[in-house]
Amino acid sequence: MQDPTSERGGSARPAEERRGPASGGASWLQRVFEEVRGSSQLSVAPAEPPPVTVVAVERYLAEAPPPPAAAPQYWYDVTLADGACQERCYLAPRLNGLVQRAHLRAGARLRLTRCSYLYDERRLNYGFLCLEELERVGGAGPPAEPPRHRPPPLRGEKKHYLPLWNNEDPYGDMWVADKPQAQVDVDVSKLTSLGQLEMTWRSRVHFHPLLVRVLHKSRLRYYGKPEKKLHMPYQAYFEVADGSGMMSMVLWNSLCPEWYNSMKVGTVLLLEQYAIKTSYPFKTQPTPGDSQMKRFATIEISLNVRDPPTKISIIPEEMVKPEWGLPEVKYRFITRSELDDLPNNHSCDVIGLVTFVGRAERARKREHGEDFWLYRWAHAIDGTSDQPFILELFATSQPDVFEHIHPMTYLVCTQMRVVRDLTENPSSTIYLTTSNESQIFITVESVLKAIGETGKEIEDLHYREHKRIAVQGIISAIRYVSCSDAAEEAPGVELVQKDTSQSLESSAVSKEDCVHKGKNTNPHNKELKSFLGPHCTPGEQHQHQALLSKKSSVKRKIPRRLNTDAEQGSASVIPVSSYPYFTRSARRKFGLNEFQHEDFVQDKNGQAVSDSLQYCTDREGMSDIPETEETGRTCDSWQSDLWAQVKDKLMKYLHHSTIFPESIPRKFDYVHKDLLMQQYNLHAAVHQPKETRTDKNINEFKSASGLGYYEVTVLGINHDVAIDVAFLPLFCPEDPHLFQLEDIQNDTLLSCMSCISACQQKATSNGRLRDMFPLSNEIVKAAMDLDGKHVVCILDICHLGDDKVEVFLSKIYKTVEPGVLDPV
């Protein structure tokens, strides 16, 4: 392409702004440009204009017209692309409404039906294309490369563009992302302090260097007006501190694009050649994290490009020395449970997991004005309350953060203000809103973990360490386990869960995994005892043994299949199949209404192994037991069709649904308080002799919660891994204040499982437990509503010592579209 100065009669725009075809052929936009510039009226209506693509729409401050004429406060430049080149054009002010109502926006397709050419009479041979009439068309155009470099606005004398929708955010190439940190030798003997400045500033013209840390940072303030001629009318203030106290520091004009992004909360600055001025009395004040810190409120530090030209250096944190005495950044974090007791306008900091993000919206600052506040609403939870933080987030000059808040990110908001009005409406909702000094931060890493990584997360846990993780998966099976069943599955003996990060081969049942400790090694006798439980009489044992002897041949199918696979060295030592799904008639036949079913198999060494912990019983082994009419569902379990298809083909199956005795709330017994305190405290550093403790077993203490829990199988979204986790509904009818029966954040499935717990509590008192249906129709319906759908499950994991780890399901989110999560 030719130099535009010669091509366009001296048009002063740079050649790199217009990119034409490699062959040098003129594009349609170039032809229109030449036609309109050569027209006697400097205006044309192109015949049969082709569609063009809007590449960019950019806003800047207009110039004030001579009075009494009125003009819009802002002008817009529009970059168009026709597939061969790009052309930056000025939008006629009477068409500003197209931008203000988002008809004209980046990516839109339109036809240019009338345009004109405008010369700037105060600049030599300088002109530009003006868009007079436009017509929108549908469809998508060819991809247009965004401009690499943005020259100054076309009209007037402004040197930069503003963000399109507000004035608080930095926008454009002039805003430096990060200034390089300085390798500066700090001479402490030449420094002054903020306290000394306050006492001596009136008697000095030049001041010694200052070494301070940024404690608070305000949003940008743009104070440009059409009648003013300032090129960079920006201001931002910071609260900085040293060992003597805290003082305001103001960053002015062209220093803002250069330094604002680099001066973060916590940054250490070395300031030289600065000015001291009397403080602006109406400036907002942040609430310091350290209430004991002295505030110097009469003066402020002024940083400018002249009078004098300030020298700023950022000191790397690793070079900061303790002897400098710089204060650390402190916060005033509150929990959601504390919020209801805080007064209106109280300042606080919060952190939580985002559960809801509203759309970005704008509010007019002044009636009939063109300046807007940009804000959005968000909800975040911190686990201390069923209610979320309700956050009103205004733009804080952090567009990269503001635009990337989404559910499942951790959000930190500082200097928030409590908004409540209990005088007029006592039931009004309490929420938090940003202040002028608020800063918001989100995680830079994904909080989602793969199900296969859960084992590694568990391996890294220390004793009694709690961690919350989120995994994507599909709810594939649910099984109800009664309290008596739980006692059998997690007795007071040491249980081992070995399959953390291993494959299916290494996670198969082994004698280390779940050896039932007992003197009798006969598998059939062990099977009998597991059915009968600890309190059966000899007569009952004989009766049940007679029942079981009829089915012993069925049970022996499983050891033969296990031994065959093991001897052949198959990768799938145990086929991962469904849990033992019993019909109601089968449960009555085996006496399972009173006692827990627990099968035992033999490994090739002849050791008896329980499969109730690993749930690897082959369904074929129970083929003679009739099923209920509902496919895949019996009285205490449900499974999806997908699970039936893929469960035998998994590469990895993690089993972490065991609930250990210390995970079940117990009724307090004052007589045995020492045992209970020992159970729920950490292990003592010094061994306590046996005689100082009671011999009572923890399982003998009455449970304070429901009658059982649920085992939930979560299948990986790639259908190759799965994990069993536990859900423990908490409900105590004797002490309703202890465990409230509430809707769990609108989580339908978990809410239903909590409700059935309450029904079982009532049924127990009425003696109707045997007639209860543990998986209610509501639970099954809620599970079927999720059948095959991708969800995000929040898992709480805790290491209980040795190899015992509990994994509880606490929340389910349904994914409705990429990047957006809704509660189930």
Image (cartoon, helix red, strand yellow):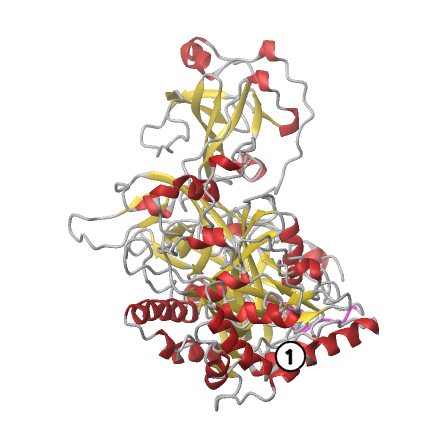
Residue occupying the point 58% across, 62% down: 471
Which quadrant of the figure has residue 342? top left
Residue occupying the point 54% across, 59% down: 490
Please identify the quadrant where the C terminus is shown. bottom left
Q: Secondary structure at mark 1?
A: helix
Residue under label 1, please give it: 555
Task: Name the kind of residue labelled 1 in the image.
Answer: Lys
Which quadrant of the figure has residue 39? bottom right
In the image, residue 130 sits, relative to residue 373, either above or below, namely below
| 639 left or right of 344 in image | right
User: Outermost residue, left direction?
Assistant: 424
Measured as percent of width and height from the top left, residue 32 is found at 62, 71
Image: magenta residue range = 24-38
- Please tell me whether the stretch drawn in magenta is mainly helix, strand or loop: helix
Residue nearer the viewer, 653 or 742: 653
Residue nearer the viewer, 567 or 38: 567
